[in-house]
Image: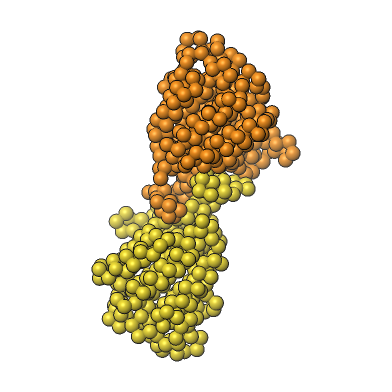
Chain colours: A orange, B yellow
Amino acid sequence: MAIIECVPNISEGRRADVVARIVDRVKAVNGVRVLDHSSDASHNRSVLTLAGDAAALKQGVLALFEAALPEIDLRQHSGEHPRLGAVDVVPFVPIEGVTMDECIALAKDTAAEVARRFDLPVYLYEDASTNPARKNLEDIRRGEFEGLAAKMASAGWAPDYGPSTPNPSAGASVIGARMPLIAYNINLATDRLEVAKKIAAAVRHSSGGFRFVKAMGVKLEDRGIVQVSMNLTNYEKTPMFRVFEAVRSEAARYGVSILESEIVGLVPAAALAATAEYFLQLAEFRTSQILENKLRS
Amino acid sequence: MAIIECVPNISEGRRADVVARIVDRVKAVNGVRVLDHSSDASHNRSVLTLAGDAAALKQGVLALFEAALPEIDLRQHSGEHPRLGAVDVVPFVPIEGVTMDECIALAKDTAAEVARRFDLPVYLYEDASTNPARKNLEDIRRGEFEGLAAKMASAGWAPDYGPSTPNPSAGASVIGARMPLIAYNINLATDRLEVAKKIAAAVRHSSGGFRFVKAMGVKLEDRGIVQVSMNLTNYEKTPMFRVFEAVRSEAARYGVSILESEIVGLVPAAALAATAEYFLQLAEFRTSQILENKLRS
């Protein structure tokens, strides 16, 4: 049985009744499970976590747009978080029994239907992107809702689906497919912020490090230590153990040890299994050997 | 939803039609899944792997006895593997959403019903045992079917349930609860068998090592290397990473490195997660952070 995760971000985080109505409409869709939803008032944004198969999630996302678009008018919206649309971004994430290619197909199919049904421009992003310049969400969202009309009129910014001008109240949406993210922090046994910053620079992609690592050095004031705070955006291609070992090795040159590490939120079982496989030097291990996988197969 | 694994061993491994009939009877029980069954002709023994909740597995095991007892006569049985009964041993193993105490209760409940319904002596073992001298299967099974009448007549060997003499054709059965076993081997980059034997002696319980490790040193002739071959009988109390590190450390004193390790058969996800937790120095990790657990909760 295929399990896909879907994490829609909507531009409403203050009116709890509006968010509740939207969540209820998604919950009512057969085969869609709403695992979680949380709202942030200062961001004025809510994040839903849905799970289901491709057919159910497509219907769930369409129900979400149908419920959200009449309620959210970006001309009246403000918040700290950058946003382009009333339904701002909708990633599909392959979890189990499903390939990335199937999630890409689902993203395109859903994007086409959203554009058609709601007269809304839609951009594809991440693994679903067909344009390297429009792969990163940050690049697509730059200029935000307020700059969208000008951006769409400029070369290279015709949307993948839908009209060539913004929807007046809902802007544009970004739909795509990506790997699960792991929010992974490594705490160092030192209060020297410059060490955390140097290590972050060494391991992150933007400054020459690993392809699928975003990282920064931060101070944990209350504990008197520093942290390399990271997002691992593809744990298959840039695995946790490799990042951990690189941080350990970089820290050692400053005479600093790793105090501990932490996973914030969720982590795929396969990322932990790959870590055990590495450190135990497991030969010929298959995830079908995991008892729970056998029980559920 | 509770998932319990049950691994009945029956004393028939040659007559495929008999085994098939017994398996079919178990499969017909509502709520019982037969994940696997395998027969060994030289052992003259078959092992079934069942999964389900407590109520279903109790009915499944009763169906197994009902099907197996008329077909298997231990007076006509021979094979390499030691055995005491037609249905020799039935362990219940907690997997998910269920405690060891619940599996112990299930073992006792099933044992009482088996004894009553089939007029069969039943011994409790491992975590279900109420008698330290009868905790290990090897101790209960010593003397085998042929020595059972004399053994049952001796002090301390009245069964936990059922008659005080063997069932003429079916002997006695051993029913209990235990943790999942992990068959875990570590291959050494050497052909010196004495090194593997010394390391096995250092880590196994019987010669002073870890409480839940059985180990021996063996030669892998075809590869020209040696192996520390182990059973980990409680991965929570004697975790994989601790055994791996101990073997690595013991090997180093002989100038030997670990070449690789291997898991034979199944491993609980929690054993891999604990390994990742150890090597990544994860602080405050909870298994509820594993994405798949969240998706299935």
Residue in front for this viewpoint, A276 or A52? A52
Residue in front for this viewpoint, A174 or A256? A174
**Residue A274 image offset from top left, x and y in percent:** 46, 44
The residue shown at (30%, 83%) is B75
Residue B156 lies left or right of residue A16; in this view the side is left
In the rendered view, would you say B280 is above or below A217? below
Which image quarter holds the N terminus of chain A? top left
In the rendered view, would you say B143 is above or below A2? below
The residue shown at (45%, 22%) is A116
Q: Taking the image as drawn, is residue B203 in sight? A: no
**Residue A112 image offset from top left, x and y in percent:** 43, 24
Residue A245 lies left or right of residue B28; in this view the side is right
Q: Residue furthest right?
A: A222
In the rendered view, would you say A164 is above or below A199? above
The residue shown at (50%, 69%) is B106
Which of the 4 quarters of the picture holds residue A105?
top left
**Residue B128 image offset from top left, x and y in percent:** 52, 72
Q: Taking the image as drawn, is residue A287 in sight? A: yes
**Residue B71 image offset from top left, x and y in percent:** 29, 76
In the rendered view, would you say B163 is above or below B256? below
Which of the 4 quarters of the picture holds residue A216?
top right
The residue shown at (43%, 77%) is B114
Residue A79 lies left or right of residue B110; in this view the side is right
Number of numbered discs present? 0
